[in-house]
Amino acid sequence: MGRILVADDHDSLRRALARALIEAGHEITEASNGNVAIERLHETNFDVVLSDLKMGGSDGLDVLRTAKALQPQTAVILMTAFGSVHTAVEAMKIGAFDYVPKPFEIEEMEVKIDKALEHRRLRNEVDYLRHEQGGIYQFDNIIGASGALQRVLDVVKKVAKSNTTVLINGETGTGKELIAGAIHHNSLRAARNFVKVNCAALQENLLESELFGHERGAFTGADKQRIGRFEQADGGTLFLDEIGDMSANTQAKILRVLQEHEFERLGGTRTIRVDVRLIAATNRNLAAMVETGGFREDLYYRLNVVQIEMPPVRDRKEDIPALTNFFIKRFAVELKKRIEGVTPEALKLLMRYNWPGNIRELENTIERAALLSDERLISADDLRIGGTGTTTDHDAPQTVVKIPPQGVPLEEIERQAVIEALKMANWVQKDAAELLSISPRVMNYKIKTLGIDFPRSRRPPVGVPLVM
């Protein structure tokens, strides 16, 4: 139901229309001429304005112009017995929602009003979501002050104002979508749509329909025309996540859009031109896939104009306290709990853990801990991640030792187990020792006797003991 202004200098028609709309549940204000209608527009916000075109004083076009100036979201429907194509075109150019010739049936007008109210509701919803989405992707909402993250944001700020294609690389859960959104919402395209597609979530035929749309009858089940994501993103940005999972056929079509800015819907013959900025993301090595023929070389170079490498959590551990506090505040509100932080032991555990699932795993861990905790501070036992003694097989990742082929020497099996533990412990020997339930002294001995080499960035300085 909506607030509706009915403006007409024919009293009998205006009152009959107002009475019918009141019975339908609407809130009605009447105006006997254009001047009164304009006065009402200055006094009250309306969802819909019904205005006669020819009235005493100001006419319907004056009412329309005033409504668009004062209340841009208000839908204006013009009524007239003196309709002409020229007048209709002029009214639509000014911004009329619809144009109805007299005489008309009350039921017909009620249908048009329902459509106008639905259109207004959808516009308000889109504006709200765009505002909320924009807020999510502001730089201030990207949590962390580590050097690794700041280097990423420096690149994002430089490329945001351009139309350059961007390729974002990174492990699962590192925040690739957040960075793509930050690029769009800090660009000149921010007022238009930011459209997201997960290429790994759809089969090839469904992905093509999702991207390019289809015509009615294009395939079994296509009972109506569908607009694709490229059309939805026209003037804005299209984010293709997990692009490394895209088939060769779809890759070729994406390449054409990048080169020619045009495509056809599935089952269609009409060429559709679009202006879309493309941002792609993957957790796979596209350069290696090019070498093996798994990804088109020409598309790779088209996508890889600017490459952004998202750091995993293990390389930005100084951001863990800030991320933890952010998630605690959010889940405390959602779960309606008075949780204010974590205990020192819990924070120590969070900092020691390697986070193979990155930010997404950290978020899920804090959500679970907030749900389970009955205290003001989340404890180490609430976290249930590796090394607490309370971790179960299904609660969190464990140290996994792959079973080697038959005949592999026992020494090599032991060596692989130690290496796996070191990787999970971010190459901190005492933490790896805890994972294997051995003492730091034994871990030190194993590292030396098994000839395990540390990554260059993790090697201790000369003269510093291995146990840390």
Image (tube, helix red, strand yellow):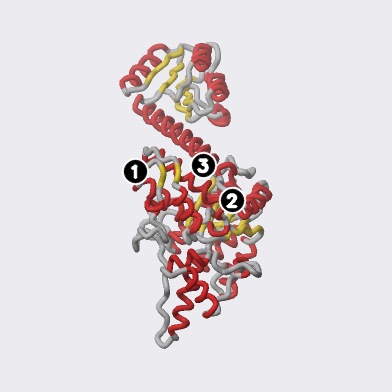
- Asked if the residues shown at circle 3 and circle 2 are in contact, with their CB atoms under 8 angstroms apart, the answer is no
Quarter of the figure that contains the N terminus: top left
Mark 2 residue element: loop
Report the front residue among 211 and 410: 410
Q: Between marks 3 and 2, how big is the CA–CA gap?
A: 23 Å
Q: Position of residue 21 (x, y in %)?
A: 35, 21
Disc 1 packing (10 Å; few <14; some 14–19; many ≥20):
some
Q: Which mark is residue 133?
A: 3
Q: Could you classify mark 3 by the number of other residues whose Cα lies within 10 Å: few (under 14), some (14-19), or many (20 or more)? A: some
Q: Which mark is on residue 108? A: none
Disc number for residue 374: 1
Residue 33: image location, x then y, percent: 49, 12
Q: Amino acid at mark 1?
A: Asp
Q: Label 2 belongs to which residue?
A: 274
Pointer 1 with pointer 3, Cβ within 8 A: no
Q: Residue at x 34, y 43 (%)?
A: 374
